[in-house]
Amino acid sequence: MKVLLFLLLSLNILYAVSVGTIVSLNGAARVFTKGVVAPKNAVQGMSIEVGQTLKTRLNSEVKIKFLDNTNVIVGSNSSIEILELKKLGVSGEKVLFKVAKQNDIKGLTIVTQSAVIGIRGTTFMISSDGKAQAIYLQEGEINVKPPTGTFKSYLKSDEDDFNQYKEQLEKEFSKYVEDITMKGATAVSIDGNEVHQLVMTKEIEAELEALKRF
């Protein structure tokens, strides 16, 4: 039994797929590996692999450089899970991305509790207050879908929609959509299936600028 377990662990290590490296660490974080009980303490220079989840502690921050030159900052009390080579799971207070241009057809996919985000090359931040989730897009373009069903979107509509629903102009306009497309310098809040416009503040812009000083 012990020999079999050793062989399985050896095969897991042999076929582990690295996606990036921790380039800096402030505070403390742990790396959990699927199928391994005990987590490892994150350290600078550590490789991050498919099947692993990095979780930061309070007042901690980890910077990861991916093999495709995508840069990620995992903020305090947050986590990033490497689901697949081009698929990441994100949760917690704050995670920032500067995604290098994706040349393949599929691009990068990020999964959160509230959304599935398709990315090709952009700079943005995902944050959460424990209930609603916010997406702040600095540049580029992303496509955002709900995990299931549709969004009830309160975002600014185009002229045709407003003409169609002109009797509601004095009220907050909403419609059900399968997805939304965000373009540079925009922000949204997702609470359940409801999507609202947010303001891109100077404080948020300053946080996103940290990605340029990677």
Image (spheres, grey):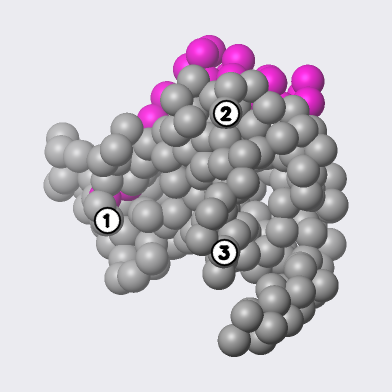
Q: Is residue 197 magenta?
A: yes
User: Are dots 3 and 2 in contact, CB under 8 Å?
Assistant: no
Image height of 152 relative to 209, above or below: below
**Lateral position of residue 24 relative to residue 79, left or right:** right
Image height of 155 relative to 61, above or below: below
Any mark on residue 3, and which? none
**Lateral position of residue 160 relative to residue 185, left or right:** left
In-front residue for pair 49/119: 49
The answer to whether residue 86 shows anywhere in this view is no
Mark 3 / mark 1, whichever is N-terminal: 3
Residue at horizontal 51 percent and vertical 61 percent from the top: 37
Which residues are drawn in magenta? 194-214
Residue at horizontal 64 percent and vertical 32 percent from the top: 62
Decide: few, some or many residues near mark 1? Use Cα within 10 Å; few <14, some 14-19, many ≥20: some
Any mark on residue 193, and which? 1
The answer to whether residue 115 shows anywhere in this view is yes
**Percent x, y of residue 38:** 54, 54
Kindly identify which residue carries mark 3.
Answer: 36
- Image quarter where the N terminus lies is bottom right
